[in-house]
Amino acid sequence: MWVKFWLSFSAALGWGVFSYQLAQRWIADLSILIGPVGAHAAIFGIAILPGFMNAFMVSSLLLDRRPRLACADETELPPITILIAAYNEESSISDTLHSISMQQYPGPMRVVAINDGSTDRTAELLDQAAGDYPWLDVIHMPQNSGKSAALNTGFGTVTSDLVITIDGDSYLYRDALANLVRRMQEDPESTAAVAGAVLVRNSRKNLVTRVQEWDYFHGIAAVKRIQSLYQGTLVAQGAFSIYRAEALRQVGGWQDVVGEDIVLTWALLEAGYRVGYSENACLFTNAPETWRQFVRQRQRWSRGLIEAFKSHWRLLFKARFSTMFIWWNALFPYLDVIYSLVFVPGLILALFGYYYVAGPMTLIVLPLAMLVNFIMYQIQNGMFREQGLKVRRNIFGFTFYALLYSVILQPACVIGYLKEVILRTKNWGTK
């Protein structure tokens, strides 16, 4: 692992030095307008650091060799408890439970659905389902208390060593539970959690969901794959992840925060545990269907990142390979602010012939960005074929994702950072 890390780091550093040298004229021209400090801050945020990150991702993806599951043919697996925190999920909770019933998990399984004070028919549907599925237990919270409280309530009833969380609007693909458990079994003993592969279920709904299909398929999957290569996946997402119950108890379960999953994951990392990723444990979830919902979701994710740093800033100084990704996350607010306040206005200026910010040198990042997308597509497509899945044709969604997605995403993240600094309200919001 350390050989792969330093090879990738060296390649990324070489690319960073090369691109910095190429950008000298660009920096000099911009310095006339905003001074050398401002010019360096802008160019590093727009091109140099993103180029370094892309180069590291390309190198790591090329060196990554995912271990095969040695116990794939075993018939018996350990007991598991699945927690489903549900709030107003009447349109999807029945499908979620049906997908669990179709898994035919080869071991004892218990599902605990926690109705967190829903005001629709979620409670009624869960009670009906409990009569159909002997493995289902239902807990009704007297009032809406938030996702963390619901999960902790369900966790209080857990007796198994392994706990899985699933969102109430998700659908498990075949063998997803077994693949996730087997990955946990075969990862090092220090592994406290393993994130599953979350994909978009409603990708044919409209442009918003079509674009997110590529974000989940390319961006999020690539990052988790690389982070797990260096034994430090930074988010075991609540939508679909497995945990060791003992480790959860050690860190106090889920905290009452906006980003409960990232804060929990960082607590496990700070406690010295490893967090992995199972790319063949697939779950399909409903992505936000309007730009307003999408912006709210990403603001919540951004708030979660700031919350994680507030509680677990010591990870910045922990001696392990994954610490580099913690530092990357520390740079995200800076990169998002530069993109939103410098690059986007620079694009507008470029339309009128002023190429101080967005111009020919901006193309430094594009070759590596396209290479990352190509490599990730090939890797993910191979995983899809192994699972009997097919990448659906979505050219328009990909074009929007590649060219315009960041124009919406990164300003939304900036607003999320500001909200976490200014506001203190905590609620379910959107996923």
Image (cartoon, helix red, strand yellow):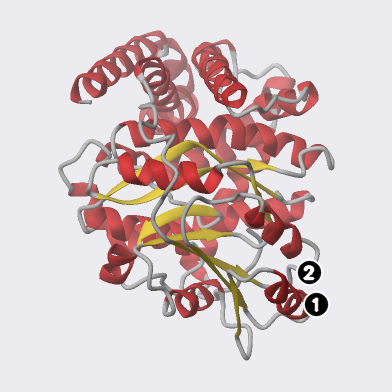
Mark 2 Cα shell of 10 Å, populated few (<14), some (14-19), many (≥20): many
In the structure shown, which secondary structural element does the residue marked by tag 1 occupy?
Answer: loop
Quarter of the image for the C terminus: give it: bottom right
Mark 1 Cα shell of 10 Å, populated few (<14), some (14-19), many (≥20): few
Where residue 136 sits: x, y (%)? 60, 71
User: Is disc 2 in contact with disc 1, using a CB cutoff of under 8 Å?
Assistant: yes
Quarter of the image for the N terminus: give it: top left
What residue is rendered at 19% in x and 25% in y?
2
Where residue 337 sits: x, y (%)? 51, 43
Instruction: Say which residue label 1 marks.
Output: 121
Instruction: Determine whether, in the image, residue 360 is placed left or right of residue 152.
Output: right
Residue 313 can be seen, yes or no: yes
Q: Quadrant of residue 144?
A: bottom right
Residue 169 can be seen, yes or no: no
Extreme residue toward the front, this view: 75
State the mark number for residue 371.
Answer: none
Looking at the picture, which amino acid does disc 2 mark? Glu
Give the mark, 2 or 1, whose residue is nearer the N terminus: 2
Q: Quadrant of residue 328?
A: top left
Reply above or below: 349 against 409.
above
Instruction: Determine whether, in the image, residue 166 is placed left or right of residue 326.
Output: right
Q: Nearer the viewer, residue 61 or 323?
A: 61
Q: CA distance from mark 2 to mark 1?
A: 5 Å
Q: Nearer the viewer, residue 101 or 52?
A: 101
State the mark number for residue 90.
Answer: 2
